[in-house]
Amino acid sequence: MKLDQCLFGYDDGHKLLASSLPLGSETSFLTELSDLAPGTVFGRSEGYWTGIPVPTIGRYVLMRTWPAPEMSRPGCVWTHALLIEPAFLESIEQLSVLQELVIRPANPADTARYREPLAIEASLIANSSAPIDDVIVRRLLAALYAKGESAIEVASPGELDGPLFAVWSQQWPRLRRNLRFQTSASQVHRSPGVARFDITAVLGLRPEAVKTRSEEADIAWLSVAASDVQDGTKGSLRRFLWRYGQDVRRQRSSFRPLIEIKEMNSSPQEKITASRLINTVRNSFPGQEDAGLLKQDLVDGVLVSSAQAVLLCKLLYQDDPDFPPPTKTGVVRLKKLWPEQSSELLDLGEITAIATDSLGSLIFEAATSQIEASEFWALTSGYPHVRGRIFQERPELLVEDAALELDDVTLAEQLRLVPREIKGLSDLIFRLLPRKDERLAVVAFEQFPIITAAQVIQASNDPNANVAGVWAKELARRPKVLLNPEIMVLITRASLLYKLADSLGWFKPEVITAGPGPWVDALKKVSNDLWGDQEDTLNSFILTLALVSGGDEGWKAVEMLFDAVHDRVLSGRLHGQAREILVSWLPEVGWFASRDVGLRLRLLVADTYVRNKWPAKSYARLTRDIKARKMLVDAASDTPGGEPYSNAVSW
């Protein structure tokens, strides 16, 4: 590897003696800069350093100036200048290695070597293990990044060199190639001369005070930066600075906020850090392009990951143009924040729940995908948009045990969104039956009429079951649902059958339209826990319903119940509601015979068989009692078209 160089010294005046690179118009500037700095005190030091960028030749110039007492003229100096390409300057971790490359001429004739590029090793390693003065390091940092005094007090010449190269090494590339310094020590502050330096040295009047004073010791960022300087290439801060300092607009003023953000990243306190973080970034790096990499890593959770969810919440809510949107990889990192930051993620989910764009949907999924079904309802109680969107996608959440902790109003709202085919719905409805909220019962019947009716019936089969009255009331308001054969066959007690008939009002039009079929099917399967008037009432109701409704299978109900009801009529034991139900539908047969309920019943039966063309054999099976059979023959004989039926009974 080659490095351009040049040499300045005395030859009938201070001038450029040799160079491997034409300096052009910068020759006079560099010549003056390489001459002895005014007021310089060498003391025990062998020389001093000067560093300055020279854009016109595309180089950073690092000079080492030595006293030249061998010259005939007092105040002469030798200055070896390294003409460093920016890329090379940025490739060296520890810039102190450059100190090993400078060579003092052995004598005035020793100039030939400086006319050729300097051959150097491909890799340079700093071997110096000399301690770095922390007080001077802090003053250098303050001078560069906190408007501190640019003239650094030192106790003796050369004392600034080590700390300066260490601080310089910490800087990221653009800072490195723009640092302007001179370490020549003088006893007074100097005028700028041909160059304005960021750092110069001045001898302190009391060396012991220079060594011990550090006004900036309590500034947090300064302590962090100084500690990193001491760590050298092992320091984590400089890696951070090199990564995120590469695209900041304002170079030096970005140093402190970058350190502050690094500290936030090292000591996460999500609820406090997020606001501080946003304010720090906005104030220090306005505009989306300023510190773009830093901002991208913040929104992606690479940096200060604990604040990512809150950061995205604030940015999305305020539609902040200073920050870029997160990448897909960054969005996925949100999942790692669960469950420690469940509230923050749910806040983020609430904002993105109504999003229609792909990024918003991706953020919502990442923020909410870790919610367990068992804790869904409790966690989302304050997040209606989150709850609505997740529930829309996962309606099976309503059948979780935790859903029962919801209030009736919320349950009713969510129940409207549940599809009919969802597994576990029947069990959910069953567990809702003790609730007394009418709206809940209404929604359940509106959305799932058959399932809800089935659960109400099955629960009501147990006389001790805890079923709120609103459910039976809603079922009674829906006779078509109740009289569905699928529902009626679920009834296991005759007393429940009676109760349902009573709740329907017995002979509503819908009941008559449905006919006796559902009742007969149910009656065949139920256990008879009725007796007395209630049993008579139920039998009279179903028999009368069959006679009134007719239908193709009504004869089965008549065949099943006629004998029992007719016998109670003949014996004078049909009373109360049972008698009222029957009599109200019997035909009028004249004033004298109207009291004969049995006759009127037989005439209605005979007429119904004839009108519906029911089987004559069924008419013959209505009773085995001889007396009653004779009465049926007479009734059929007195009915137009009843001859086949009277014959069937006579035979």
Image: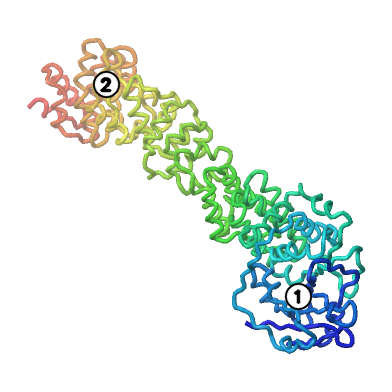
What is the number of the mark on residue 156?
none
Disc 1 packing (10 Å; few <14; some 14–19; many ≥20): many
Residue type at the position of mark 2: Asn
Say which element carries label 1. strand
**Residue 459 x, y percent position in the rendering:** 35, 27
Nearest the viewer among 379 and 170 is 170
* Contact check, label 1 and label 2, Cβ < 8 Å: no
**Residue 543 x, y percent position in the rendering:** 26, 25
Q: Residue furthest top?
A: 572
Q: Quadrant of residue 37?
A: bottom right
**Residue 589 x, y percent position in the rendering:** 28, 20
Residue type at the position of mark 1: Leu
Quadrant of the drawing holding the N terminus: bottom right
Q: Quadrant of residue 44?
A: bottom right
Q: Which residue is mark 1?
A: 62
Q: Give the alpha-carbon distance from disc 1 to disc 2, as whole Å.
A: 116 Å
The relative height of residue 197 versus residue 648 in the rendered view (above or below) is below
Report the side of 438 relative to 293 (left or right). left
**Residue 456 x, y percent position in the rendering:** 37, 29
Q: Identify the image's colour scheme: rainbow, by chain, secondary structure or one colour.
A: rainbow
Indicate which disc, 1 or 2, sits on the residue closer to the N terminus: 1
Quadrant of the drawing holding the C terminus: top left
Determine if residue 34 is in view: no
- How many numbered discs, if any? 2
Nearest the viewer among 341 and 380 is 341
Q: Which residue is mark 2?
A: 539
Nearest the viewer among 502 and 467 is 467
- Closer mark to the observer between disc 1 and disc 2: 1
Say which element carries label 2. helix
Nearest the viewer among 33 and 602 is 33
The relative height of residue 367 versus residue 197 in the rendered view (above or below) is above
Q: Quadrant of residue 49?
A: bottom right
